[in-house]
Amino acid sequence: MTKLTMEQRRAKDTWEKSEGYRSDHVNLAKGLPALIMNSGLMQTMAFLHEKGSRDSQRHCRDLANHLRGWLHERFPDDVPRDFEGFMTALMEADTRKFQAVTTEAFSWLRWMRQMAAARVGGD
């Protein structure tokens, strides 16, 4: 088996995680990069956590969990999967690590926007 490139790994991860997504998930995935650019990664994750605590906002919880899961996979020693650990780790991260995590979030979201839309709009 050939080793996957990072882009292929992101594509595979988002394809698998977007199974079962609805249009709410797609709309959120499309808007998250702008929200992160305007408010920051931590503020955006706090927003998703708060919104996701409501049953009617399941798409916020799903997307936040999937993004944190991916970031944990990419930075296993630095970024915990759970919300509180994730937030604490980013609060304590140095500038380079924080920027690397944020950059990776953008890269993953670029794929999620496309994969989620393809799943919802496709056959």
Image (spheres, rainbow, N blue to C red):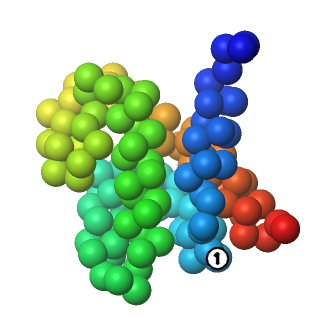
| Residue 41 to residue 3: above or below | below
Compared to 20, does 72 lie above or below? above
Question: Residue 100's x, y, as percent?
Answer: 41, 28
Three-letter residue code for mark 1: Ser
Image point (83%, 66%), residue name: 122
Residue at image position (40%, 37%) is 71
Query: Which residue is farthest bottom?
Result: 56
Q: Residue at x 51, y 60 (%)?
A: 32
Is residue 112 rendered to the left or right of residue 74? right
110 over 49 or under it: above or below: above
Q: Which class describes the residues within 10 Å of circle 1: few (<14), some (14-19), or many (20+)? A: some
Decide if residue 72 is in sight here.
yes
**73 to the left or right of 122:** left
Please tell me which residue is depicted at 24% across the width and 48% down the height of the picture: 82
Give whichever of 100, 22 is nearer the camera.
Answer: 22
- Which secondary structure lies at badge 1? helix
Residue holding disc 1 = 23
Looking at the image, the residue that sits furthest to the front is: 1
Q: Quadrant of residue 22?
A: bottom right
Q: Is residue 77 left or right of residue 100?
A: left
Quadrant of the image containing the N terminus: top right
Asked whether residue 90 is in view, the answer is no
